[in-house]
Amino acid sequence: MPSARTRVGGRVTGVVQGVGFRPFVHRLAHELDLIGHVGNDAAGVFIEVEGPSAAVELFASRLRVQAPPLARVAEVQVTVLPPSAPGVTDGRAAFRIVASPAGGPVATLVPPDVAICGDCRRELFDPTDRRYRHPFTTCTNCGPRFTITRALPYDRPMTTMAGFAMCPACEAEYRDPTDRRFHAQPIACPDCGPTLRFESAGHRAGGSDVGIVRGTEPALAAAHRTLAAGGTVAVKGIGGFHLACDATSPAALVRLRARKQRPDRPFAVMVADVQGARAIAELGDVELSALTSPQRPVVLARRRAATGDAGEQLVGQLAAPVAEEVAPGNPWLGVMLPSSPLHELLLATGPDTEPGVGVPPVLVMTSGNLAGEPICFDDDDARARLAPLVDGFLTHDRPIHVPCDDGVVRVIDGEVVPLRRSRGDAPLPLALPAAAPPTLAVGAELKNTVGVGVGQQAWLSQHIGDLGALETLQAFERAAEQLTSFFQISPTHVAVDPHPGYATHAWARRYHRDRLEPVQHHHAHAAALLAEHELPPEETVLVAAFDGTGYGDDHTVWGGELLLADQATSHRVAHLSTVPLPGGDSAVTNPARMALAHLWAAALPWDERLACVDALTATERRLLRQQFERELACVPTSSAGRLFDAVSALLGVRQTISYEGQAAIELEWLADAFTTAGQADAIAPRYRFATLAQAEGWHLDPAPVLAALLDDLLAGADRRALAAGFHLAVAHAIVEVAERVAADGGPRTVGLTGGVFQNAWLTTRTRAGLEAAGYRVLTHRRVPPNDGGLAYGQLAAVAARLARAVPARDD
């Protein structure tokens, strides 16, 4: 520094609002005896400090390296200013946090919601603390952020807490630089914060108070009574409503499944602590780390069997085991810990809990919606849509501005893989491969998320869902508006899946016709994978993009693709041989139809001893054969997802489905149950795809695999071995294509993406085969391999190709 006294201005961008950054700066400046100020604005955090040069230098170096744990500093810009005149400090006798000015360009990031921290949890259960059993306790290190933000900068007046005036005690904590709640925007206490209430399912807003129980303890006691009686309670959490019931009660679960129209799909469960989680699921270090992370996602973990000393001891800690009806036939459970103080209290006995009314140790905690609809987050909407599903509502008067469902993760090969990126992660930024103009990406039809990008940053929305219902389409539109509003983006380009039947495609064409940037579905999957690994945009990788459905360049249904791809372009070098997709969606929901389609394409008999043949009537089989022979209402498909469905039906696992991917998921369970790996390896050489050279690339023909499966099945072989052998055949086919591409001078890096690679059994063995052959393998770690990551891939592809002036494919 050029003088003994230095004055500098600073600008910090990133996730620096709502994470205690200003209090951190304030404490640091006071520690170093500096004067100046810090504040929030729409662009981030602005700072001015003045003092001895050595102290200012130390301040600048510690600003980044000692930032609060929830902060993510993207950039620190420093400008040297003229020192104040001797004796002049402009009235600044100390370092201050100043008010946030309104307006200005947005460069800061909306902070995500953060699960209750250890300090707040200790206070929650400390009878001597003034926030004892307060359902809305929070501090600088935890609590709602994204879901309560109306606009930036992130200050209380810009959140849904604006309507709650702080009491003198909270105001004092908020102003005290040494307090953990210094400038914590959602700060509240029992005297000034939101209030809890329980409503009977029949209560209507605006009516009398009959059916309403007000106050924390009476409301919790009413909820406990309802749960103990086998009822279902709609619980308003951080980002929306959950449906809660006793996970140890088969009767309660049967009733909830009937009401929710969800016969098979597994429910997530919530337990009070890690000990409770270990009592019901097998959790390794990586699963435990994910389970206790600030995001508090649903973690898929193997269901613990009550066998052996350890299993019996842990399961014995529960009053009753988790009912089979939580996840019928499923060896896995989706487990989570409480993400909010309210959930903590719901799992604990309270002073008003009636004698003899036990609090269930494990609660189902599933999204508050009907099948196919978005999560409810508004009280009036919840009363209208959820009343037929529940026996009561445990709700409160803090509004939710942005709905945000639970995230879901799974551990594959020792790494956490997001299956649904939502609360706690949205809307944290992701890197783009090149500077992008203001761009909106509308994502896919299933597992929809939307995204925006500008410069080299992208922001994805929370999970929205499948756009098959009007309510979900409205949620999609609301999320697009909120993202563009938060980041003040007026899109000049709109990235869209070219599928003409997608609601997202129709919406984008209706409102942004002149700005469309079509990105082929599987190229978007590939671009998302390469971008999350921050590969150079021009680096080419062989990518296996395996999923259920994607609109192909030839206007057929793709889904078993091997692409030579960089982030701007892709070229199809191999794919599964096409088979007829009879009747579109009817084939997707009836795997037996896909099994017969694959047998017909492979010239294999429809033997009536097969479960998939027996599942269809003679009339149905006759009509199917006519469809195939005359090519009536049959779109060709190369879908890997439909091949997994077909094999599932062939092996008698699942002939019809009630939720997406069910047949393939249960086929993985069957393979996973086959623990005699040596026998699978012995079978595997007989299960091989035929690799056929064609003008447009290699065709991977499953006919030899299906013929071997058919022979072994009819000979009475262990179905678990057949399922394992099929998975190994798919893995081997990918390795074989990689070897052929490399022999032609292609890359020795292979990516695995698409919904099929949510299958841990397949992913692990494909990776092992590729790595044994000397390949680097890329899999997802930041965005889901399924269509939940598609919007990110669309943004990455558009950014990369605009930077290289690569034309878009024809829409």
Image (spheres, rainbow, N blue to C red):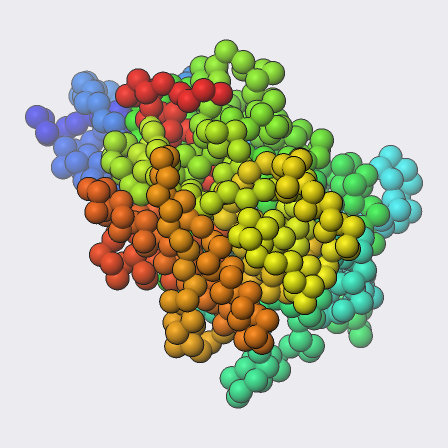
Residue depicted at 45% across the width and 46% down the height: 576
Residue depicted at 38% across the width and 67% down the height: 685
Could you tell me residue 402's position as x and y percent? 60, 35
Task: Choose top left, top right, bottom left or bottom right for residue 187.
Answer: top right
Residue that protrudes farthest toward the bottom in the picture: 309
In the depicted structure, whether residue 490 falls above or below residue 5: above
> Residue 209 or 321: which is nearer the viewer?
321
Residue depicted at 46% across the width and 58% down the height: 704
Task: Choose top left, top right, bottom left or bottom right for residue 464.
Answer: top right
Residue that protrudes farthest toward the top in the picture: 514
Report whether residue 673 is seen. Answer: no
Left or right for 308, reference 215: left
In the depicted structure, whether residue 693 falls above or below residue 610: above
Left or right for 681, reference 372: left
> Residue 349 or 262: which is nearer the viewer?
262
Residue that protrudes farthest toward the left in the picture: 2
Residue depicted at 64% across the width and 46% down the height: 588
Could you tell me residue 623's position as x and y percent? 73, 45
In the depicted structure, whether residue 370 falls above or below residue 346: above
- The number of discs equals 0
Report whether residue 383 is seen. Answer: yes
Could you tell me residue 752's position as x and y percent? 38, 48
> Residue 172 or 298: which is nearer the viewer?
298
> Residue 72 or 689: which is nearer the viewer?
689
Q: Quadrant of the N terminus?
A: top left
Could you tell me residue 803's position as x and y percent? 30, 21
